[in-house]
Structures are given as C-alpha cells and as structure tokens.
Image (cartoon, grey):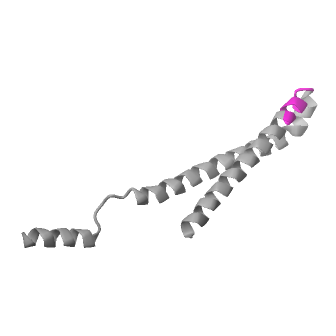
Amino acid sequence: MIKKDLDALIEQTLDNIKSDREETEYFLENLKEYMKVSSERFNDAGTTAAKFLETLQRSNEQLVKLATLVYKKDSHKLDQSLSENDKEELFDLIKEK
C-alpha cells in the first residue's frame, strides 16, 4: 500500500514538474518575443523574466531531490548484504559441519 502511494506521489510530482516547466517555458518564450521590440519593454519585463527563470531553476532542484529520493528508495532494494540473522544462520550451518 505504501509503495503504491509513494509511486503515485512520485508520478504526480513528475507530472506537475513537467506541466509547470512547459507553461513556464511557453510564457518565457512569449516574454522574450515581447521584450525584443524595444529596450523599454526589456526594462519593464526583465523582473518577470527573472521570475520565470527562477521557476525553472526550482523545478530543476525538485527533479534532483526526487531523483535522490528514488535512488535511495531503489538502493535499499538492491542491498545484497547479509542481515545479522542471515550471518548467524550461516555460522550455525558451518559449525554443524
């Protein structure tokens, strides 16, 4: 149940990040076209453009954090080391022989 919930949250997060990035890139492209017309427009819209770039940077940070969480989650699955119980059982088997 928890795995399904976590997988669903990861998928939803990725969808949100992708959607936010697409919208931000769309508006940033339009803003760049608007700003090309004159230096006055560039001065007026520069702060807005910076905010769009900050949004893209935050989505990059979210992707890195999400990738780190997924890596940590998956690396626990790949942990092939023996538990203390496994070690004791092996030791008992060796002692028996």
Question: Looking at the picture, how far across and down is residue 23, in whole percent?
Answer: 80, 44
Residue 42 % position (x, y): 87, 33
Relative to residue 92, is residue 12 drawn left or right? right
Q: Measured from the top left, where is residue 46 in percent x and y?
A: 84, 38
- Taking depth in this image into account, of 15 and 40 the one nearest to the observer is 15
Location of the N terminus (image quadrant):
bottom right
The residue positioned 39% from the left and 56% from the top of the image is 78
Q: Is residue 69 left or right of residue 23?
A: left
The vertical placement of 47 against 88, above or below, is above
Q: Quadrant of the C terminus?
A: bottom left
Q: Nearer the viewer, residue 52 or 71?
A: 71
The dominant secondary structure in magenta is helix
Please tell me which residue lies in front, 15 or 44. Answer: 15
Which quadrant would residue 86 be assigned to in this image?
Answer: bottom left
Res 54 seen here:
no
Q: Residue 33: within the magenta?
A: yes
Residue located 30% across and 60% down the image: 81
Q: Is residue 75 left or right of residue 87?
A: right
User: Is the residue 66 above or below the residue 31 in the image?
Assistant: below
Outermost residue toward the left in this view: 97
Position in image of residue 56 (x %, y %): 71, 44
Q: Residue at x 84, y 40 (%)?
A: 27
Looking at this view, name the residue that lies furthest to the top: 37
- How many numbered marks, from 0 up? 0
Q: Is residue 89 above or below residue 64?
A: below
Residue 48's image quarter?
Answer: top right
Q: Does the segment drawn in magenta span residue 50?
A: no
Q: Along the line of sight, which residue is nearer the eye, 83 or 26? A: 83
Task: Give the magenta-colored segment's residue range.
Answer: 30-37
The residue depicted at 64 percent of the width and 55 percent of the height is 11
